[in-house]
Structure formats: structure tokens, C-alpha cells
Image: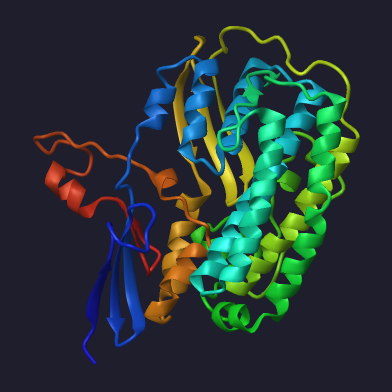
Amino acid sequence: MAEVLVPIGPQHPALKEPVSFRVWADGEVIVRLEMDVSYNHRGIEKGAEQRDFHRTLPLLERICGICSHSHTTVFAKGIEALMQVEAPPRARAIRTVVAELERVHSHLLWLGVAAHEVGFNTLFMWTWRDREAVQDVLEALTGNRVNYGINAVGGVRRDWPPDLVSTALDRVAPLGDRVRLYADMVAREKTMLARFTGVGKLTREQVLAYGAVGPTARASGVDYDVRRDDPYLDYARLPWKVITDDHGDVLGRTLVRVGELHESLNMIQVLLRDLPPGEIRAKVPRTAPPGEFLSRYEAPRGELVHFLRTNGTDRAERVDVRTPTMANWTSVAMALRGRWLADIPVIVAAIDPCLSCTSRVSLADPEGRDRGGMTWDELREHGIRFYAEGRHER
């Protein structure tokens, strides 16, 4: 049978954000796939370079609504390292609680979306009901349900009185039983097993070769988590373990996230029961000395990296963001090759993609004098694309 090109996007009813999939299929089987990202570029990196460190934090929260705390924490801890300032113990504990609440929120949201993709809407409604409870806790602790605004350079902006901590504990405790129920459903429910088992399979070698991160990597047996392997905040003193699985498919990615829900809820309760006393913010200088720092953080979707360069002023000279979605795109292309067309929504959803997180822009001289010798039209045509063969071209 002849190959047929099936275009999906950039505008498509199944896509919440713009991305273009060019799928070549032989019948219903995907032969190869090309993805074109960066339809939505917001210029946040350049905007961050035009603001002082403190005014940059609210901007970076807008990179991703689900990972807003991730971006402000990784930036703040990077600037603090360059300033040679350490956030107080109470501030580190508060940052860690919000980080793990954000992870619980993200994984519950993802589990609901994954269930919805296969028509299991009961689980979708249950997990999103519990997600509302987590957002209620975040709102009580930070004042906001999405962009929490809790971080400041040198610590946090808001302290938690004992009655607020007690209320948060009471709201978080029942979620443990709910997560155990979801773990049982994922392991036994026939609909999820039929649609997740063996779908989007990636070997450990493929994950390492194509640089996948987060639950996508850990579901293929890669025992790596920045929280443990490059500790920050309070993770080194907390009782927790890295969750891995050896299925290598969408089922494995689901089991990893459900397991991480258990670990996150336990960490949250340990921290809330034993918040260190003291100040919530260290005094920081107005400027940072010249230097460079690679700040790393385990966001809900995987390793998040901010490269920061300072020049002795109150602004970052360079802010370069590498999000986990950007790292995981190539592995998606590999996982789709040889699968059915109907598996596209499930496999793509399995990395929990944030399309706006992948925003990138390239500039070319109108006369074609850029490094590649391309004109603007040529650059726009070839762009940044990810192929099923694993090549990354510019």
C-alpha cells in the first residue's frame, strides 16, 4: 500500500496548543513522523533579560501555568548561587512544600487527561475533583491557584502561621487513600490496560540516546531524578525514593506518576509537621557579580534547566530555558514509529506536553548572511524539526 501523508495541526480540535505533526502512514500504521514546534513564541527569555531579578520572577511564572513554581525556583536558586546567598531553612521548606503540591497537581491533571484520551471519563472526573482540593491548598498557602507568586530572590514572600499549616495538613491527608485507589484502578482496569500496555514503548537505550527526562525516562528503567542526584531545597533530608518502572510504555509512565503521587504526599506531610522556625527571606545584594550558572530542577515533567549569565548589574545578561517537553519531543517521534494512527493522542499525552514551553525563535539576515546561509523563507521552511529517525536539524 502506498504511504499517505496525514497532517495534524497546527490548528486541530485535538490540540490545545499549536504544533504540527506530519505523519506518513501505510494504511493505519505510522511509517515516519515529522514534528514542527514553535508556533507560539512569546519572547519570555528576552523579556527576562530586560527586567531586574525581582521583576523577572512573575514573568517566568508565565512560561507554564502548571510548572510556574518550578521556573521561579530554578531561577531564584540560580541567582542566589551567583550572589553566594542561601535561602533560610524555613524558606527552603516552604519552597519544597509548594514544589511537591505542584507535582501532585500536575500528575493528577495528567492522569485525568490520560483517562479521558481512552474514554475512561469516570477516572478523569475523580482525579480532577482531587486536583481541585490540591489547588484549594495552594490557594490557602500562597494566595493563588495557578501562578503562586511565593518565591522571592533570597527566600519566599509569605510565611505560614500554625493554623494555616494545620488546615493544609487536614486537606492533604485524605488524598493518600484516593491515590491508592487510582493505583489499583490503573493496575486492574481493563480499558487502561488495553490502551496503555505496549503502546509508545521506549527501551532504556533509546531513552538515553534521545535524552528523554522525567517520568518518560524513569518508566524505561532510567534511575535518575535531579532531586536526589543533584539535591536542592530540602530533598536531601527527606524520606523518599525515586520511582522507576521497566515497562517502557504508556502504562509504565502512568505507574511512575502514580507512585510519585505517594512520595510527594508523604514529603508534604513530613515538611508541614516539622517546618523549621526562623526567617523566610535572606538579605540579598541589589546586583549579582559577573558569572554563569546552570540551575537544575526536577519539574513534574522532568529535568528543567535555566542557564543564567550575570554581568555585575541587577539584570541577567542571558536567560536560556530548556524545558522537559523540549527534551522529550524526539523520544515521542521514536515511540510513534510503527504504531497505529489511533495511538497518537495517547503517546503524545504520555509526556504531558506543554507546547508553549517549547517556544523558540531563529533569526536570519534578510540577505542570507546568517551562519547557515539561509534566507528567512528557507529558515522558516526548515525550522527546528524533530524526525522519527532522531535527527535534530536547524
Q: Residue shown at 67%/29% (left/top)? A: 142
Answer with the quarter of the image where residue 248 lies: bottom right
Residue 161 spot, x, y in % from top left: 83, 23
Residue 91 placement, left or right of 196:
right
Residue 169 placement, left or right of 81:
right
> Is residue 270 positioned above or below 144 on the image?
below
Q: Residue shown at 55%/66% (left/top)? A: 114
Residue 381 spot, x, y in % from top left: 18, 53
Residue furthest right in the image: 274
Residue 179 spot, x, y in % from top left: 75, 61
Residue furthest bottom in the image: 1
Q: Residue shown at 37%/59% (left/top)? A: 15
Answer with the quarter of the image where residue 28 lies: bottom left
Number of numbered discs present? Answer: 0
Q: Nearer the viewer, residue 43 or 369?
A: 43
> Is residue 263 positioned above or below 99 on the image?
below
> Is residue 321 positioned above or below 34 on the image?
above
Residue furthest top in the image: 286
Residue 20 spot, x, y in % from top left: 30, 59
Q: Residue shown at 30%/81% (left/top)? A: 25
Q: Is residue 88 visible?
A: yes
Colour scheme of the picture: rainbow
Q: Is residue 214 visible?
A: no
Q: Nearer the viewer, residue 104 or 153?
A: 104
Q: Quadrant of the N terminus?
A: bottom left
Q: Nearer the viewer, residue 114 or 394?
A: 114
Q: Nearer the viewer, residue 297 or 392?
A: 297
